[in-house]
Structure formats: C-alpha cells, structure tokens
Amino acid sequence: MNQKLGKRKRRTGLAPAARSKVPGQSDPRPYFHGGNAGLKVGQYILPPAETGAAQNGSVPSHIRGKDHIYMVRDFVEAAPWAAHHESPIIYQVEPEGNVENDPDVEKPGLSYRCPKAKIVAVHNIPANLLLAAQLELLRR
C-alpha cells in the first residue's frame, strides 16, 4: 500500500474518488450542452435573450429562462437536447459566471444553468445514442 496515499485517505476519511464530492470543492466532471452543430471551440454558448435563438426542444418558454444556458454533467443526458436539432451535436463547455442548479428540475445535480459557457470541445453523438435520444423524443 502506498503509505502516503493511505495517510491521506485516513486524514480526509474519504477514498480518492469520493474527495471530489466534498462540499466546497469543485466537481472535476465536465459540463455538456446539447445543441445544433455550427459552433467551434473557443466560441460561446449564449442565452436565447442574446442570440434570438428559439427555445431548445419542446420545453415551454415559461419553464426555461431565456437569460441562461443549460448544461448537464452526463454526456448521455445531453443527447436528447441535441436530438431536437437538425444537426445534433454535443458541446463540452466551461461555464462562465454563477453556476446554479436548474430551478425547474426537482432533483439537484441533474441540470445546471449559467449566464454563458465557452466551448472547449465538440463531440459527435454516436449513432446508437442519437437514435435512442430521437426515439425518446417521439415517445414524449
């Protein structure tokens, strides 16, 4: 056993994977935003109030604020949001400004919102995941 790691585990009382969950520490998982292709790394995802873009998907306008962008921490969870678009894509983003839990989602930690986010990577959606997301939309 690595003695140094063992001491650190005893000191914090948490295994290495659990340490990122300590309140007040940042979560190392990336954020993802499902949308329409066309943006590049270095550009920003901006809220509809600034871009004039239509609401994403079938969410009523009184639910989603037009002054924020919405993100998830799970790549798979971003796919249904992208599937609404003609050219679906998933952007990995770094939020800028205050990040907060989406107030319209009952369980904290599923969806987040912030004023804007910088694109750090662009991911194609695997065909099987995109098909599953599109089928999910049809069932709604």
Image: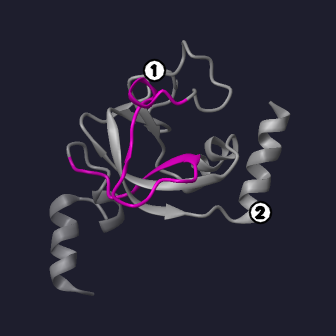
Q: Amino acid at mark 1?
A: Gly
- Say which residue appears at 20% left-offset and 43% top-offset: 24
Q: Quadrant of the N terminus?
A: bottom left
Cα gap from disc 1 to disc 2, whole angstroms? 31 Å
Q: Depth-wise, is mark 1 or mark 2 nearer the camera?
A: 1
Residue 78: percent from the left, percent from the top? 57, 48
**Visual colour scheme:** one colour
Which numbered marker is on residue 128? Answer: 2
Residue 50: percent from the left, percent from the top? 38, 28
- Say which residue appears at 62% left-offset and 41% top-offset: 81
**Is 92 displayed left or right of 53 in the figure?**
left
Q: Amino acid at mark 2?
A: Asn
Q: Which residue is mark 1?
A: 65
Q: Quadrant of the C terminus?
A: top right
Q: Please, is residue 18 above or below residue 104 in the view?
A: below
Residue closest to the far top? 62
Q: Please, is residue 37 above or below residue 101 in the view?
A: below
Q: Which element is circle 2 on?
A: helix
Residue 26: percent from the left, percent from the top? 25, 51
Residues rendered magenta in the picture: 25-53
User: Tag 2: Cα neighbours inside 10 Å, few (<14), some, or many (≥20)?
Assistant: few
Q: Please, is residue 94 above or below residue 16 in the view?
A: above
